[in-house]
Image (spheres, rainbow, N blue to C red):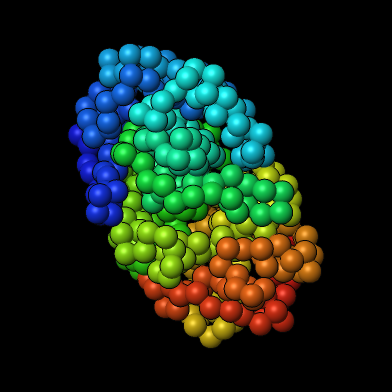
Amino acid sequence: MSSNPSSTVHIDLGDRSYDILIGGGLFDSLESYAAVPRSATALIVTNTTVGPLYAAQLHAALSQRHREVLEVHLPDGEEYKDWQTLNRIFDALLGHGCDRKTVLYALGGGVIGDMTGFAAACYMRGVPFVQVPTTLLAQVDSSVGGKTAVNHPLGKNMIGAFYQPQVVVCDLDTLETLPERELSAGLAEVIKYAPIADAALLDWLEAHIDALLARDRAALTHAIRRSCEIKAQVVGADEREAGLRAILNFGHTFGHAIEAGLGYGEWLHGEAVGCGMVMAADLSARLGLIDAATAQRLTRLIERAKLPVVGPALGADRYIELMRLDKKSEAGEIRFVVIEQLGRAGVRPAPDALVREVIAAHTG
């Protein structure tokens, strides 16, 4: 493991504040967990893909901090982000008599992070947990901000809790083993931050997308840090998604419909979000908020990131049915995150007829 100097992004939430550590050689370094409460027992929650790669190293590091380090290895994939798999975490905790000081460590991607955080929020009404994200998507998005959940067959992330980690340890070394498809999926969540919060980031991404795909360490460090800075700012202002935080779901209303409509796991979350951003940008243009050239510019970048830009042909009725289940919907009215101008987003409804035009233009 390399020992690159790390940088820190702080999430300011009063007594729930914490740091995001970004760098190489972090996840198996004891210093990374200095802010974590001492406890006799720790539970590493990972999956059958990440576990064989990194669990032993994390276990060895944590053994110097906790008297007993347990592990549970869950099946890998969005399709396992459900109650049945969640119960395996509770089985491990209860089966070993874990108390309310037990610390959970989420070692994996967004699914592991979301499920571990939700388990931590629920077990004995709340135990500490740590995010150790091993995918780009988790490092720039799902591990940051305290949104935890499991999926329901009728909707993604509909059952969950807001529950903040003690620290987020983004070790860039773990990205070396990430499959190319997963890397691209993570880039979708990086790209998302540009149209909603930082127009200059779009220029930077257009210039550096090839370097990011090639896993250039300097480019990845900048992309992850800037993404975390934007998310930290938004979450600090609106922890529980009363208003501003909803802009982080740009592309997600269409994207979640794709995931649920195809069946969880068919497309990666980032792939669905990438395609969803193409649709949301087009909707923004059809609403007269941005020009068509801006929507096309974003589409070209998403395509360069090796993400799909054409959605599955589920039919407009099915898309709309699924989107009515979105958490931003109010009284059955679908509300979309739209680009109001490059670098600024808002949430508003759109006429069904316009949404149908967008779906027709971008599915096949």
Task: Report the residue at 44% width, 57% height from top.
Answer: 191
Q: Quadrant of the N terminus?
A: top left
Q: Which image quadrant is residue 107 in?
A: top left
Whether residue 50 is visible to the viewer of this picture, yes or no, is no
Q: Which image quadrant is residue 226 in?
A: bottom left
322 relative to 345 in the view: left or right: right
Task: Report the residue at 66% width, 63% height from top.
Answer: 325
Q: Which of 349 and 270 is in front in this view?
A: 349
Whether residue 354 is visible to the viewer of this picture, yes or no, is yes
Indicate the position of residue 95 as horizontal and vertical percent values.
Answer: 54, 19
143 relative to 287 in the view: left or right: left
Image position of 221 with respect to 29: above or below:
below
Indicate the position of residue 194 as horizontal and vertical percent values.
Answer: 40, 63
Q: In which quarter of the image is the C terminus?
A: bottom right
Task: Report the residue at 76% width, 69% height from top.
Answer: 316
Image position of 142 with respect to 301: above or below:
above
* Total number of numbered discs in the rendering: 0
Indicate the position of residue 235 as horizontal and vertical percent values.
Answer: 35, 58
Task: Report the residue at 49% width, 50% height from top.
Answer: 161
Indicate the position of residue 197 as horizontal and vertical percent values.
Answer: 36, 67
258 relative to 182 in the view: left or right: right
